[in-house]
Amino acid sequence: MTHPYIEHLLKDHKKQRKLEKKLIKAETREDKEKYRQKLYDALYPHIEGENASIFDFLVKKGDEAKAGALEAMQEHHVDRVLLDELMALDVDDEVFIAKAKVLREVNNHHLKEEEKEHFPRLESLASEEELDALFEAYESAEHEVEE
Ligand SMILES: [Fe+2]
Ligand SMILES: [Fe+2]
């Protein structure tokens, strides 16, 4: 059975994919602003939470797990740069949709790697108790951003 922590991360990914799609399809100023904010609110805490839990754990494991985790955290960094730039743009700016599409491409590549590589690796390396603790670490980092 999939641990609730992993289930939670997968549910977040589903939400991110849905919001990215809605943002790219948005036509009115109102919708572009709405979905940009919703995507920001979904993505930012997720990134902070993952850095403080799964990737902190995998970095400590060393070797291949560490190398992969460092790469994933660099992808988080690129996500944040693009997200911050998107937040600073006027939604009618000619690069708005182009930037939103690139964010989606970068993030979807990242989500796929997490789901195919990092989550299975975590499940094979961490005990039930460790997964419980990582879920707690994830949620406290996530809430810190939201406050
Ligand atoms: Fe991530
Ligand atoms: Fe993720």
Image (cartoon, rainbow, N blue to C red):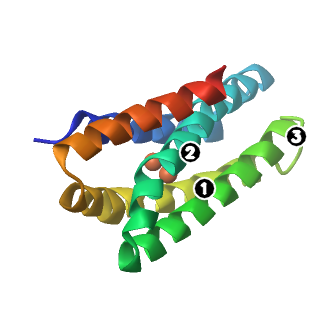
From the image, tell me which residue sits under label 2.
47
Depth check: give the residue in front, 59 or 12: 59
Element assignment for label 1: helix
- Residue 30 figure quarter: top right
The first of marks 2 and 3 along the sequence is 2
Disc 2/disc 1 C-alpha distance (Å): 6 Å
Element assignment for label 2: helix
Disc 1/disc 3 C-alpha distance (Å): 20 Å
Q: Is residue 29 left or right of residue 114?
A: right
- Residue 71 figure quarter: bottom right
- Give yes or no for contact between labels 2 and 1 (Cβ–Cβ under 8 Å): yes
From the image, tell me which residue sits under label 3.
89
Q: Of the numbered discs in the image, which one, if any, rests on residue 35? A: none
Residue 33 image point, x, y percent: 75, 26
| Within-10-Å neighbours for mark 3: few <14, some 14–19, many 20+ | few
| Within-10-Å neighbours for mark 1: few <14, some 14–19, many 20+ | many
Q: Of the numbered discs in the image, which one, if any, rests on residue 76? A: 1
| Within-10-Å neighbours for mark 2: few <14, some 14–19, many 20+ | many
Indicate if the residue with disc 2 has its beta carbon within 8 Å of ligand 1: yes
Depth check: give the residue in front, 24 or 108: 108
State whether residue 50 is above or below residue 120. Answer: above
Instruction: Identify the residue at image location x=64%, y=29%.
Output: 145
How many numbered dots are placed on residues in this image? 3
Q: Mark 2 is on which residue type?
A: Ile
Which quadrant, please, contains the N terminus?
top left
Element assignment for label 3: loop
State whether residue 109 is above or below residue 127. Answer: below
Indicate if the residue with disc 1 has its beta carbon within 8 Å of ligand 1: yes
Depth check: give the residue in front, 40 or 126: 126
